[in-house]
Image (cartoon, rainbow, N blue to C red):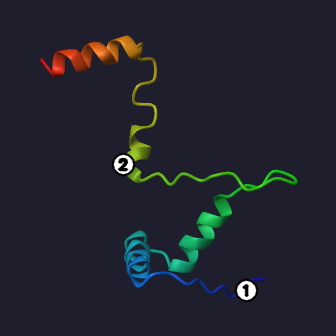
Amino acid sequence: MQTKLTLRLEQRLIRRAKAYAKHAGKSVSEIVADFFGRLEAPAGGPATEVVAQSPAVNSLVGALAGARLDEADYRAHLVEKHR
């Protein structure tokens, strides 16, 4: 059963939400429902934090799988970069 929910947001956020929803081919209600659907509440506990990931971020997932880099490599890179 669906029920109406009223959100009070700044006009700027509403414009951005509508533009995002249009770009995604969804309604603002669907976007909000998707977000809340991703929140998982463990039994008796608070909902876990959801980190929104853009398609660009998702495309990078696993890009460094198997790479053998550590902090020393990163520091060496920075030293070389800022010479």
Residue in view at x 33 percent, y 18 percent: 74
Q: Quadrant of residue 72?
A: top left
Note whether 15 is above or below 42 in the view shown: below
Is 78 left, or right, of 16 in this rendering?
Answer: left
Q: Quadrant of residue 34?
A: bottom right
Identify residue type, mark 2: Ala
Q: Looking at the picture, how far across and down is residue 32, in whole percent?
A: 58, 72
Residue in view at x 15 percent, y 22 percent: 82
Residue in view at x 42 percent, y 13 percent: 68
Mark 1 lies on residue: 3
Identify which residue, 47 or 24, lies in the foreground: 47
Q: Number of numbered discs present?
A: 2
Mark 1 surroundings: few (<14), some (14-19) or many (≥20) residues within 10 A: few
- Give the Cα separation between the discs numbered 1 and 2: 34 Å
Mark 2 lies on residue: 56
Is 25 left, or right, of 83 in this rendering?
Answer: right
Q: Would residue 10 be visible to someone looking at this image? A: yes
Identify residue type, mark 1: Thr
Identify which residue, 25 or 21, lies in the foreground: 21
Note whether 36 is above or below 62 in the view shown: below
Q: Would residue 69 be visible to someone looking at this image? A: no
**Which quadrant of the rendered structure holds the N terminus?**
bottom right
